[in-house]
Amino acid sequence: TLKVVRIVTTGAVNACVSGTAILIKNNMHYTDGDGTTGPYDDGSANVGSWAARSAGAWGNSLRVETCNTAAGFSESAKTTAAATEPAGETVVAFTAATGFAVGDIVYFQEADGQKYRITNISTNNVTVVRHPATTATGLASEIASGVNIDREWRWADQFERAPGTSQYATDRGGSNDELHM
């Protein structure tokens, strides 16, 4: 049996989604507290939906992505291109970039089916790279003003379909209980 003991240094905290990072020493500290801090299972930690299990830089390398609706999974004709963009361009002007997020995959209706991943959004100017990653950069072909732009969750290709309602929830009168992580 191997047991790993980590020494927590001064200032060590658990990586978290938002709020102020705090030190969560272990499961018992999270659920019962230690007499000085915690418990945190009541939501008082204010760290967002997720916190790393272990304190220190190691937890900073972890990432959690979720999708809990069909619209979050993919949307056809979400917006249109605001201007004609030449082949090779890396920034595309959207009519409206509301509802898009860095990491989303977009499709500009190119004949070759090329998709792009959003790397930055500045108002309605969206920076993209080819997806899946290749050595080529910029748009594969010219994008016409007014062309429909489809979007999908970055990890949509890892799942057969959008999250919806399981048979278990349907049998009990529930709905929309599925979640992709």
Image: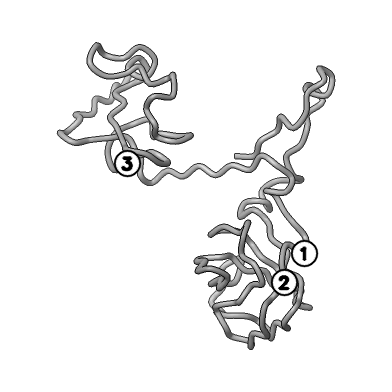
Who's the residue at 42% across and 43% down the image?
62
- The residue nearer to you, when weighing 170 against 124, is 124
- The residue nearer to you, when weighing 115 against 158, is 115
Q: Earlier in the sequence, mark 3 or mark 1?
A: 3
Q: CA distance from mark 1 to mark 2?
A: 7 Å
In the rendering, which numbered label is found on residue 80? 2
Mark 3 vs mark 2: in front: 2
Q: Is residue 96 left or right of residue 136?
A: right
- According to the image, label 3 marks what residue? 58
Q: Are marks 1 and 2 in contact (CB under 8 Å)?
A: yes
Quick one: SS at disc 2? strand
Who's the residue at 68% across and 56% down the image?
152
Q: Is residue 158 left or right of residue 10?
A: right
Task: Determine whether 70 is above or below 157 in the image.
Answer: above
Q: CA distance from mark 3 to mark 1?
A: 40 Å
Residue most extreme to the bottom: 86
Tell me which amino acid carries mark 3.
Trp
Question: Does the image show residue 1?
Answer: yes
Q: Are marks 3 and 1 in contact (CB under 8 Å)?
A: no
Tell me which amino acid carries mark 1.
Ala
Q: CA distance from mark 3 to mark 2?
A: 41 Å
Quick one: SS at disc 3? helix
Who's the residue at 59% across and 72% down the image?
130
- According to the image, label 1 marks what residue? 77
Residue 9, image quadrant? top left
Task: Determine whether 66 is above or below 100 in the image.
Answer: above
Q: Earlier in the sequence, mark 3 or mark 2?
A: 3
Near mark 2 (Cα within 10 A), the count class, few <14, some 14-19 or many ≥20, is some
Looking at the rendered image, the quarter that the N terminus falls into is top left
